[in-house]
Amino acid sequence: MGLGIMFCIDEIMILQDVSQYIKEGQNSDPSVQRILSIFPSSYCTFEVVLMARLLFFFLFNVICSISLTFVVNDEMERVERGEEMRLN
């Protein structure tokens, strides 16, 4: 859930930064520049947002896969504990 929130915040920050630059000619925010520095400078804003989405969705899928693989299943743990208590 936190990854999704960060994704939304980053996308909004990038779009607001570009909007402020276009409308008022303000300098770019340093935190947005750090995000943009990950991608090649030849990418337009749309491509950066799209690539950031792909990156966040990839990370989300990796985190979900790890949690499904390595996190203990509560239901199975309860069944095993119940069987252990019944046998004792």
Image: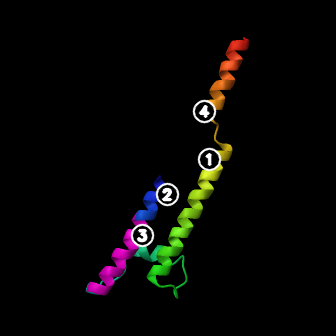
Residue tagged 4: 74
**Label 3, label 4: how far apart the Cα atoms are:** 35 Å
Task: Name the residue type under label 2.
Answer: Leu
Magenta stretch: dominant secondary structure? helix
Magenta-drawn stretch contains 65: no
**Among the two numbered marks 1 and 2 on one chain, the one whose residue lies closer to the N terminus:** 2
Q: Which of marks 4 and 2 is in front?
A: 4
Q: In this view, does 69 lie above or below 49?
A: above
Residue 26 or residue 77, whichever sits in front: 77
Single out the residue that lies furthest toward the top.
88
**Label 3, label 1: how far apart the Cα atoms are:** 26 Å
Task: Name the residue type under label 4.
Answer: Asp
Colour setting: rainbow
Q: What element carries label 3?
A: helix
Q: Which mark is residue 3?
A: 2
Residue tagged 1: 67
Magenta-drawn stretch contains 13: yes
**Among the two numbered marks 4 and 2 on one chain, the one whose residue lies closer to the N terminus:** 2
**Label 2, label 3: how far apart the Cα atoms are:** 12 Å
Classify mark 3: residues with Cα within 10 Å, few (<14), some (14-19) or many (20+).
Answer: some
Task: Name the residue type under label 1.
Answer: Ser
Q: Are marks 3 and 4 in contact (CB under 8 Å)?
A: no
Q: In this view, does 86 lie above or below 52?
A: above
**Label 4, label 2: how far apart the Cα atoms are:** 24 Å
